[in-house]
Image (tube, rainbow, N blue to C red):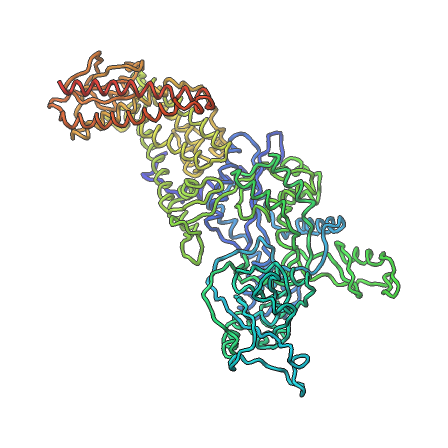
Amino acid sequence: MSISKTYQPKQAEDKWYSYWMEQGFFRSVPDEREPYTIVMPPPNVTGVLHMGHMLNNTIQDVLIRRARMQGKNACWVPGTDHASIATEAKVVAMLKEKGINKKDLTREEFLSYAWEWKEKYGGIILEQLKKLGASCDWERTRFTMEPDLSDAVIDTFIHLYKKGLIYRGVRMVNWDPQGKTAVSDEEVIRKEVNQKLYYIKYVVVKSESPKDGKTESGDPILPDFRTSGLPDHLTIATTRPETIMADAAICINPNDERYVHLHGAKVYIPLIDREIPVILDEYVTMDFGTGCLKVTPAHDLNDYELGIKHNLPVIDILNDDGTLNEKAVILIGEDRFAARKKIEVMLEEAGALEKVEEYKSQVGYSERTNAVIEPKLSMQWFCKMDEMAKPALDYVMNGDIKLIPEKFTNTYKYWMENVKDWCISRQLWWGQQIPAWYLPNGQYVVAKTVEEALEEARSKKQEAGSIDYSQLTIHDLRQDEDVVDTWFSSWLWPISVFDGFKDPDNADINYYYPTNDLITAPEILFFWVARMIMAGHEFRGQLPFKNVYLTGIVRDKLGRKMSKSLGNSPDALELIEKYGADGVRYGMLKSSPAGNDLMFDESHCEQGRNFANKVWNAFKLIKGWEIDETLPAVNKVSIDWFGNRFNESLVEIGDYFKQYRISDALMTTYKLVWDDYCAWYLEMVKPAYQDGVEKQKIDKESFLATVEFFENILRILHPFMPFITEELWHDELFGPRAAKDCCIVANLPAIGEIDAQLLTAIENVKQVVTEVRNVRNSKQISPKDKLPLAIKTNSGIDYPLFEAIVTKLANLEAIEYTDVKINGANSFLVSTDEFFIALADNIDVDAERERLLAELDYLQGFLKSVNAKLQNERFVQNAKPEIVDNEQKKKADAETKIAIIEDSLSALAK
């Protein structure tokens, strides 16, 4: 077939992705081959393709395509996560646009709308991943709220409850006032924000005041800071003046001499004038702020612990939506932040505000809604983690599961050794409803269905004065309104996607589990990766995967995290439209070492597109050749060299993949193709231009070898750039292809023997050609003018073997060999060999001397550093013998070159 002038990515992408799907190349079923399994970290159904998804899924696709080409049964399971908080927020917003309030709907009506939204929008991101080339087994697509996976969640809850690992209780939780639900610690994003620090005066209750702070007539005594002779007071610094109405005490350090006279005293809360005690605790740091701490047990975790210790009342002044309730006494119904501004004015008017300072501090935000988190006491369901964390820690510390890079092992260890109980309940309707059923007397039972719950309730031991459990009916039971945390479903993902809960001994779970590699982000190492390891051990007695590749964060070239708010995150699909999927894949992988952030620059995608065009143009060049049976084989050395160089690269690429250095594997492939194949090999073997012929004539051996090399290049390039490789694979140049004879399922090339001596010799030959070209450029000699070259060999390289290559690429008229230096010629060194180009005009002696002196200076400095190493006894004794030998070779080589340059300088002086 004729080949277009330039590569047309869109045409190739649409054509070959459809073809791969039609041929079932992504499909995997258990067979006799070695399985290679990846489960996709399920993106939220609310999501659209962003740069993080692009990076994560490109890496997964590279690994799955490579495994497929290694002859393994590659299975990549895709799916989506129901994302309780984010999806419910989307549905509520959709309903609001329709004039519908969630409060006016029954649970069933709301869920009907939610499922409708999910069916319409929930699969968008998976369709977008197809544009990237993701070769998932789409027939295996799972959703965390589909019936079988929801059953697994409920069964898991019941199992852990019966085991005593799930319990219900009041605890301080992270509360999302916008989502109106608890969220886990890991779903709280800490941000440094500019705030104000308010210094507020609390009046000390005087001992001579009438009892209870009231006058004889019963009116309260109201302190006025504006009067002369200010009463004694304490100053408290806080960033949250709107919570002073929930204060239960003022705490001072018992060793703080400034406040000794206030031990046992009481103070008034400004504006509401409620008395609270001054308590003593060494928890307070004397030299921080004013040394006084307001204790608000309902709205701060540390204050809550202090409150328990000192038996303080808990006064929760906030509603679930972040507005002030009746317990606040003032500003009832106001939003917390609006109340903050109003209280600042009220305090100032009352003379209770000493000063306000600008202040920077860390504030927690909900990952899902971006609302500021409120610490809140709440009745929730919790899962004990200690027991499950221990074996999960052992898997990693024993090396059964490898974290890549290893630097995350210490982070994982710290988390697992300091694990906290998991708040697993969420105050939402979208999700798996907690299988707990409440009886009329407030007790509850845990069961999968209401019928099972009724049976459980009726079997309860009858207690004196309690209801008659035997007479209960279904109508007496009420199911818990909450759903379980979304992560409580996704921690089961590697098992549930293979129906390991529904059918624990089915063919899929036995074949594909444990999976091989998990590709994910470091920020979910604990609350997804670690929990999957726990679940794998708890429910299968096995690890869920063997390797965890932790990607970095995609940042812009200024180092900023990509985000919509900054406007620095390019549209993923627009990038594909502009540069082609292969170009974008290259751009994502180019600078993405595991665990380190990727400084993304759109120019990387442009480089990827240029690389695709380079491959395309190289193929066009070969297509312009035609075998001439009468021509002799003249390129045997070049063919042998590239075959060896190809094998050497295969070893390097394989080693990089073993180390999960995907970026390095790509760059090795890139250099092999662009530098070794295109820039050197094709130049070595391409026929001389023959005017007036349709195709350039070439000998049969060179043509067949060149085509075979190109086909093998397509194989190793395919995992990185699947579309252009498949497009070229089917060209008639390679002969007829059967329907399933595609690059996607072609075997990777086998590694052959490597002639290191030949590789070294050709590297020297390439340098000789480069040096001749440098002389030509410096002297402004036309590339068409042939030059003479004389060689004085010292290294033992058999240059006559490579004469044809040097003569062709350097455009030489002749090569001669000499035992002496040629005075008046331009000279250069390659290794320890000396080369001379005698030009018609005399050389610039001064310039040549300057060049040689500069090279001599460099070599002398280099030799000095090598000698310093070899004279270091610790280095010589502790380094590996081969490293020491290498340094000795460097020394001998430098000394030889220095002697040669000194001789050349002497010759110039004559």
- Residue 796, placed above or below residue 863: above
Q: Quadrant of the C terminus?
A: top left
- Residue 795, placed above or below residue 716: above
Residue displayed at 31% across by 38% down: 5
In the rendered image, residue 254, in percent from the top left (x then y), is placed at: 62, 62
Residue displayed at 31% across by 15% down: 797
**Identity of the residue furthest to the bottom in this view:** 217
Question: Looking at the image, which is closer to me, 700 or 875?
Answer: 875
Residue displayed at 57% across by 33% down: 73
Task: Determine if residue 458 is in view.
Answer: yes
Task: Determine if residue 113 is in view.
Answer: no
- Residue 142, placed above or below residue 221: above
Q: Quadrant of the N terminus?
A: top left
Q: Quadrant of residue 473?
A: bottom right
Compared across the picture, whether 226 is left or right of 838 comes to right
Q: How many marks?
A: 0
Compared across the picture, whether 165 is left or right of 371 comes to right
Compared across the picture, whether 792 is left or right of 79 comes to left
Q: Quadrant of residue 754?
A: top left
In the rendered image, residue 816, in percent from the top left (x then y), is placed at: 21, 14
Residue displayed at 75% across by 54% down: 448
Question: Looking at the image, which is closer to me, 895 or 97?
Answer: 895
In the rendered image, residue 531, in percent from the top left (x then y), is placed at: 63, 46
Compared across the picture, whether 133 is left or right of 513 comes to left
In the rendered image, residue 165, in percent from the top left (x then y), is placed at: 72, 50
**Identity of the residue furthest to the top in this view:** 819
Q: Quadrant of residue 861?
A: top left
